[in-house]
Amino acid sequence: MAETSQDDKQVHVINMSTKQIIQVVILGAFVGILVWALAYILETYVLKALLCQGTQTVKCSSATTYAGIAASILAAGIGLFGLVKIGVFRPLLVVIAATASLWGLLGVVNSLPFYGILIAVGGLTSLCYLAFSWIARVRVFGLAVVFMVVLIVAIRLALMS
């Protein structure tokens, strides 16, 4: 019987250590809470001051949406740097997938109390970062993207219901 060495076997996924998994979960929770905090600060101190002057109620009502969008983009950039530092495989793909799947989450959880928002946003972002980091380990890029798109659609459908 012919022996095969480790080099002959093609590894289909990139290994991820337990330390990296824990770091990704913590980073995801941090990014989720950061999205909420940035959105709150931007809405309260920047956008309402700019958009809610006089009788401009239409522009004023969209301050929350704009704050959420800006906060998601800024926090995604910070999340990208964190994933690169941790050494996650395909960090940009992970951040794009997590941001796309949780786009508008603040509008869904806005009616919860303060601690509920922090738990929901931090927990869901943490789970998304973990799930997409796990999927990104697949060596075949197209297959990883297909898995991620399916998961993004499932998350979006769950958030919309």
Image (cartoon, grey):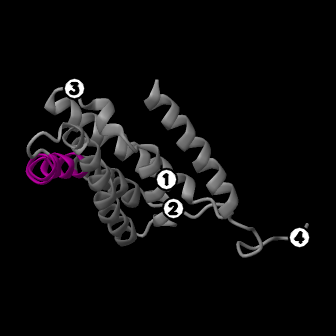
Q: Please state the extent of the stretch shown in magenta in the rendering.
A: 34-51
Q: Are marks 1 and 2 in contact (CB under 8 Å)?
A: yes
Return the residue nearer the eye: 9 or 46: 46
Query: Callout 4 environment at 10 Å: few (<14), some (14 to 19), or many (20+)?
Result: few
Residue that carries the numbered disc 4 in the rendered image: 2
Q: Amino acid at mark 3?
A: Leu
- Give how far apart the Cα atoms at labels 1 and 4 are: 43 Å
Query: Callout 1 environment at 10 Å: few (<14), some (14 to 19), or many (20+)?
Result: many
Query: Callout 3 environment at 10 Å: few (<14), some (14 to 19), or many (20+)?
Result: few
Rendered position, 108 above or below 39: above
In the image, what residue occupies the spot 66% across and 51% down? 146
Residue that carries the numbered disc 3 in the rendered image: 112
Q: Amino acid at mark 1?
A: Ala
Closer mark to the observer between disc 2 and disc 4:
2
In the image, what residue occupies the spot 35% across and 59% down? 76
**Which callout, 3 or 1, points at the residue further toward the start of the chain?**
1
The percent position of residue 161, horizontal first and vertical second, equals 46, 23
**Which callout, 1 or 4, points at the residue further toward the start of the chain?**
4
**Which callout, 3 or 4, points at the residue further toward the start of the chain?**
4
Q: Amino acid at mark 2?
A: Leu
**Prevailing SS of the magenta stretch:** helix
Q: Amino acid at mark 4?
A: Ala
The percent position of residue 14, horizontal first and vertical second, equals 58, 64
Q: Would you say 62 lies left or right of 92 here?
A: left
**Which callout, 2 or 4, points at the residue further toward the start of the chain?**
4
Residue that carries the numbered disc 1 in the rendered image: 97
Q: Tag on residue 93?
A: 2
Rendered position, 81 above or below 24: below
Q: Is residue 160 magenta?
A: no
